[in-house]
Amino acid sequence: MKTDWRRAWRGLTPRVVLGFAALTAALMVACGVYLYQALRLELGARDRDEQRGKIVLFRQALAGVSDAGMLRRNPDWLTHFMVGHDGLALRVLDARAAVLVDSPAALPPGLWRGLDETPARLSGHDAHGHPWQGLAARATLADGQAVQLEIWRDGHDQEALLAQYRNHLLWAGALATLVAAALGGALVRHSLRPLAALTAAAMAIRPDTLNQRLDASLAPAELLGLVNAFNDALARLDAAFARLSDYAADLAHEMRTPLGILLGQTQVALSRGRSLAEYQQVLADNAEELERLARTVNDLLFLAKTEHSEAALACEWLDVRQEVDEVCEFFALLAEERDIQVQVEGALRLPVARAALRRLLNNLLSNAIRYSPPGSVVRVALDARLPGVAVNNPPAAPLPEPLTMLFERFYSQGDGNGHGLGLPIARAIARQHGGELRASLGDDGRLTLAAQLAASASLVQARRCS
C-alpha cells in the first residue's frame, strides 16, 4: 500500500511540528546572534579598558625616562610590566617611526600618527596573518621628547573563543529545534486524542443509529461548535429519516384499504359469471376507489414536495379578498346543501403564490364546511396584523387533544370521508410562505384555523418570494 505523502504532509500534525521547529529555529537564531554579538562586544570593551589602563601606566613610566637612548638600552624599563599579560604586546616609536621598544611578537607595521593625548584605535594583521587590535597614544619622555605608545591585543585567541562559542550556539539551536519538533508532535498527538475519539464515535453512527449523538464533553473548546453543528445535522437527518419512514408507513396504511377493496371486489366479480350491468357496477366502484387512491397519492406527493422544497415561490401581489370570494363561490353549492352560511370580512393584499393560496383556501373552507353542523356560520377573516387568513367555524364533532393532531397526516374527524391530508397540506403551504397554520378554540367553542402567510412584514415576504 503506497503512502500518499503529499496528502500526509497536508495534515495538522506535520504542519504543527514544522511550525514548532521553524519557530524554535528562528528564536534560537535570533538569540544566538544576540548572544554572539553581545559576547564579542563585551570582549572588545574589556580589551580596550585593559589597554587604556596600560597606556596610563606606561605614560607614567615613560615620564621618568631621561631620553630615547636610555629607553633603547633598557627596554625592560617598560616590558617588565607585560609579564603575566599573555596576548598583550608593547611598542614605542619615536617621531621618525623608529622602534624604541618592541615586543617579541610580530606586530603589524608601525606608523607615526602624530597623536594628541586622546588614544586612537589600531588594527591590522601580523606576518602570520593573525589579527591584532590595539590603542595608540602620545607619551612624553623626561627630556620632553614625544613618543608614540602602542598597546596591542592578539585577536587570534579571541576569534577562536568566539568561533567555539558560535559552534556551541549552532549545536544548541539544532538540538533545541529537534526537541521542539519531537515535543510538538507529541503535544499534537495528545491534543488530537479527543478528535480521534469523536471521529470513532462518528464512524460508528449508522442509518439505524441516527439517534446517537457525539459526546460534547469529549471535545475541546475549539471543537465544541463543530460537534454541536454535527449533532444538529444528525438531528435534522434523523428527523428527515423519521419523516420518510412515517410517509412510507402512512402511505402503506392508506393504500392498504382501497387496494383491499379493489382486490376483494375484483375477486368477487371473477368468482362466477356476471351480467353486463354487474360488471359495470364493479368497474364503477373500482373507478371510484382508484380516483380516491389517485387523490391520496397526488396529495402525498404534493405534501412531500412542499415540506422539503427550499426553492423560492413565484409570488405576486394579490388581492386576497378576491381569491377568497372566488373560492367561496366555488363552495357555495356544497355550503347550500349542508345549510351552511359563509361570511367573509376584511381586505388584504399580500405577495403570495396564486396556485398555492387557492389550494390552502380550498382545504380550509372545505374542512370548515364539511365538519360544521347544519345551520351554522363559517366566518373567513382577512387580518393584516397576522398577516393572513383565519377561518372560524363551530366543530360538529369533538376535537382532539391537543389541537395539533388536526395537522397530522391521515387524521380525519366526523364521518371519515376525507383522507386526512387537507390540513397538513395547508400548513405546509403556510410554512412555504414563511408563516404557520395554527388552531385555537375560543370560549364560545368555535374552532379557528389561522393561516399566517408571512414571517414578518409583507415587504420582507415580497423580497423573499421575488
Image (spheres, rainbow, N blue to C red):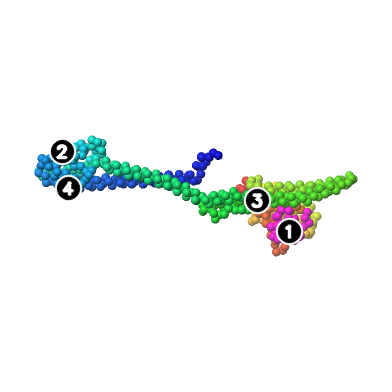
Q: Looking at the picture, does residue 440 appear above or below residue 85? A: below
Whether pointer 3 and pointer 2 mark residues with C-beta atoms closer than 8 Å, the reply is no
Q: Nearer the viewer, mark 1 or mark 2?
A: 2
Three-letter code, disc 2: Val
Q: Where is residue 40 shown, x and y percent of the image? A: 29, 45
Badge 4 is on which residue? 57
For the residues labelled 3 and 2, the Cα–Cα distance comes to: 104 Å
Q: Looking at the picture, does residue 255 appear above or below residue 377? A: above
For the residues labelled 1 and 2, the Cα–Cα distance comes to: 130 Å
Marks 3 and 2, the one that precedes in the sequence: 2
Main SS, magenta region, reads loop
Identify the magenta region.
392-417
Badge 1 is on which residue? 393
Residue 240 within the magenta-colored segment of the rendering: no
Secondary structure category for the residue under label 4: helix
Marks 1 and 4, the one that precedes in the sequence: 4
Q: Nearer the viewer, mark 1 or mark 3?
A: 3
